[in-house]
Image (spheres, rainbow, N blue to C red):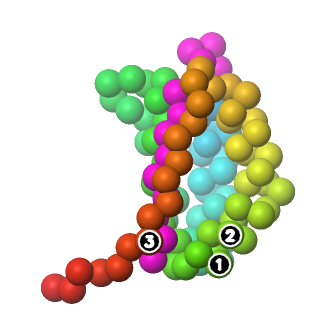
Amino acid sequence: MIIVTGSVVVQEAHLAQALALSLEHVRRSRGEEGCLAHAVHQDVENPRRLVFLEEWTDQAALAAHFALPASRAFVRALGALAAEPPDMQVWKARPTGA
């Protein structure tokens, strides 16, 4: 499984727009092949910070997601609303066993 974590602090004047763009993106992404989970959360200590958590079946599914024009457009649009550079990390995870 591939896990993606990310966050961005958006400009206060553009928070509503960033939230709308983010919700549209995660809802679209959830329907993609290989997407196990995709969510955006608002930091309770800094409401301008949006936190993303994604789970994908494998690297190929994530690569296909990143290659979509809609995903690239989302990154550009959200980046334009950012107050500071976004952060993203990609993790390869495996079950620990129960």
Label 1 with label 2: CB-CB less than 8 Å: yes
On screen, residue 78 versus residue 9, left or right, reads right
Residue at 61 percent of width and 42 percent of height: 22
Magenta-drawn stretch contains 49? no
Q: Label 2: which residue?
A: 63
N-terminal label among 2 and 3: 2
Give the amino acid type for the residue marked by disc 1 in the picture: Ala
Residue 92 appearing in the image: yes
Residue at 21 percent of width and 86 percent of height: 97
Q: Quadrant of residue 58?
A: bottom right
Which mark is on residue 92? 3
Label 3 with label 1: CB-CB less than 8 Å: no
User: Can you name the residue that lies furthest to the right here?
Assistant: 69
On screen, residue 23 versus residue 91, left or right, reads right
Q: Quadrant of residue 29?
A: bottom right
**Mark 3 → mark 1, Cα distance in angstroms:** 12 Å
Which mark is on residue 60? 1
Residue 16 appearing in the image: no
Q: In the image, which residues are magenta?
A: 1-17
In which quadrant of the rendered image does the N terminus lie? bottom left
In-front residue for pair 92/34 = 92
Label 2 with label 3: CB-CB less than 8 Å: no
Give the structural element (helix, strand or loop) at label 2: helix
Give percent across and percent down for residue 40. 49, 46
User: Can you name the residue that lies furthest to the left here?
Assistant: 98
